[in-house]
Amino acid sequence: KAGVTQTPRYLIKTRGQQVTLSCSPISGHRSVSWYQQTPGQGLQFLFEYFSETQRNKGNFPGRFSGRQFSNSRSEMNVSTLELGDSALYLCASSTRETGGTDTQYFGPGTRLTVL
Amino acid sequence: AQSVTQLGSHVSVSEGALVLLRCNYSSSVPPYLFWYVQYPNQGLQLLLKYTSAATLVKGINGFEAEFKKSETSFHLTKPSAHMSDAAEYFCAVSDGTGGFKTIFGAGTRLFVKA
């Protein structure tokens, strides 16, 4: 079974631009979560989608948004990029069979650099 | 609110020595606890998870962790370190209520000396 895939793997943008990142979960997984990883703040939860609905949201500004499609693929969008948005963005999928004990499977991440 | 504290941002051990990575958690509800490993330029991989079935949890690659409620700890151990264990390790907590929101610790980078 193929793992979680994220595209693109690397991205360079300039301040003020917007960016869209894509995540394809493992086949059969309906939950997709997004995390931001930076050296200063570590791993921070952005949001989780399940069956096209946002179920949980972290403490990020409204510039960060996401969506999930009927095939469970998910995208996240960051508008009006700031230098501090430079980070590794990780996507994780799970089956959500039993809630919080589910195993999350992480993709390799998208490295976003904002200049 | 939940939180996780990992003691020591860097840990260095010799090959063959005991690995001990410390994690303390805070949770107002019975927690679900996880240890993940991250190799350079890769995503996170689950090592093990505590789901209240047993306090001593065995994971992959010879790692195990013990849940101690009285100490609010979930330390990760491995009897004998291998060079391939060099990576960053994250402890995480989830309350499992209504969706999937995981709080991660700051991480501990493990160095293994030959």
Image: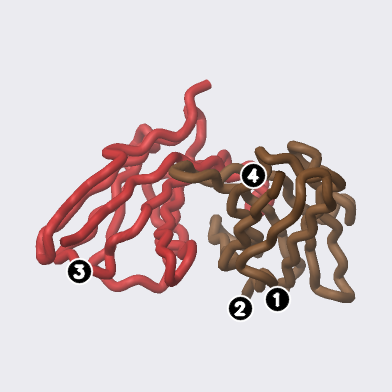
Chain colours: A red, B brown
Label 2 sits on a secondary structure element that is loop
Instruction: Give the residue number, with chain letter if any, for mark 2.
Output: B1
Question: Is disc 4 placed on a helix, strand or loop?
Answer: strand
For label 4, the crowd category at 10 Å Cα-Cα, with few meaning under 14, some 14 to 19 and many 20 or more, is: some
The answer to whether residue A24 is above or below residue B93 is above
Picture quadrant of residue A65:
bottom left
Relative side of A4 to A9, left or right:
right
For this rendering, which residue is in front, A8 or A73?
A8
Give the distance between the C-alpha atoms of the residues marked 3 and 4, in whole angstroms: 31 Å
Q: Residue at x 54, y 40 (%)?
A: A105
- Asked if labels 1 and 4 share a chain, the reply is yes
Q: Comparing marks 3 and 1, which lies closer to the viewer?
A: 3
Q: Nearer the viewer, mark 4 or mark 2?
A: 4
Q: CA distance from mark 2 to mark 1?
A: 8 Å
Vertical placement of residue A24 versus A13, above or below:
above
The amino acid on which the numbered mark 2 sits, given as a three-letter code, is Ala
- Binning the other alpha carbons within 10 Å of mark 1 as few (below 14), some (14 to 19) or many (20 upward) gives some
Badge 4: chain ID: B
Disc 2 and disc 1 in contact, CB within 8 angstroms:
yes
How far from the left and from the top, in percent, is residue A97? 63, 42
In the rendered view of the protein, which quadrant contains the C terminus of chain B? Answer: top right
Alpha carbon of mark 3 to alpha carbon of mark 1: how far?
32 Å
Few, some or many residues within 10 Å of mark 2 (<14, 14–19, 20+): few
Do the residues bearing badges 4 and 2 touch, measured as CB atoms within 8 Å?
Answer: no
Location of mark 4 (residue): B46
